[in-house]
Amino acid sequence: MDFDEMLATWRTQDTTPPHDVNRNALQQALQTEETRVRRAWRSRRRVLWFLGIFGTGMAVWAGFWIAITITNGWPAIYAIAAGVSLGMFALAAGASWVGRGREPERNFGNTLQEEVGRCLALVNYQLSVTRRWIIPMLVTASITAGAGLFSWTVVKSQDIPVSSRVGWFWYAVAFVVLAPASYKTRDEMRKATPKLKLRQRRLQELLAALDARE
């Protein structure tokens, strides 16, 4: 019996073996689910934190390159390209910080009602993540495009001999990897939303039922 089945069984109070769910079993299931969600939340924040730091660093470097371009009197196209890449890196950094979100609330006790309330807060957080599915895609696309444009600026301004075929090859690889991954992420989040809404409703009903029995 998984977490959602246990919620459904408790909601209907089906006491026919082997579907009986006692309070201790439900509380343990809630704690297990909380651990799983918080682990996923920490992993997501680490990825966005890394991308945010990387985007910020590249934005600073692009800003320095604009200053170098202007100081050396290089063609304006290089300063413009560096400025556009700076904007893309800044967009990626900003979206990363926004996408990290706030930590799901921990200020609950250890009674069953409080465990349910904590799990409900986690479900609300998961739903907010599904509504922001575009952010990781935006961050990745901005960094990829910004890196490509900035690389072009550096290579051209310094007359660095680089095969165009190599550059196109790596961009093709990036597209082949990122496009399916982005679509898969969007599809998974779209499919998860109805399940999370159902879980949210059952937890709200369960919390109301527990409060009513007190």
Image (cartoon, helix red, strand yellow):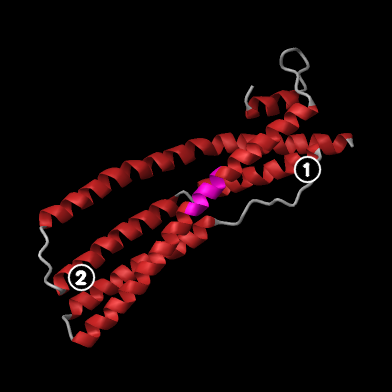
User: Which label is found at residue 114?
Assistant: 1
Q: Is residue 112 visible?
A: yes
Left or right placement of residue 138 versus residue 195 in this view: left
Would you say residue 145 sits in the magenta stretch? Answer: no
Quadrant (top left/top right/bottom left/bottom right) for the C terminus: top right
Q: Residue at x 27, y 77 (%)?
A: 65
Mark 1 neighbour class, 10 Å CA radius: few under 14, some 14 to 19, many 20 or more: some
Q: Residue at x 11, y 53 (%)?
A: 165
Residue type, label 2 = Val
Camera-nearest residue between 7 and 161:
161
Mark 2 neighbour class, 10 Å CA radius: few under 14, some 14 to 19, many 20 or more: some
Q: Which residue is mark 2?
A: 154
Location of residue 56 in the rendering, given as x and y in whole percent from the top left corner: 41, 68
User: What secondary structure is marked by label 1?
Assistant: helix
Location of residue 173 in the rendering, given as x and y in whole percent from the top left corner: 23, 46
Above or below, 16 against 39 in this view is above
Location of residue 123 in the rendering, given as x and y in whole percent from the top left corner: 63, 42
* Residue 11 location, quadrant: top right
Q: How many marks?
A: 2
Quadrant (top left/top right/bottom left/bottom right) for the N terminus: top right
* Residue 95 location, quadrant: bottom left
Location of residue 149 in the rendering, given as x and y in whole percent from the top left corner: 24, 65
Q: Residue at x 62, y 34 (%)?
A: 198
**Could you tell me what secondary structure mostly forms the magenta stretch?**
helix
Magenta residues span: 40-46
State the separation of the CA atoms marked 1 and 2: 56 Å
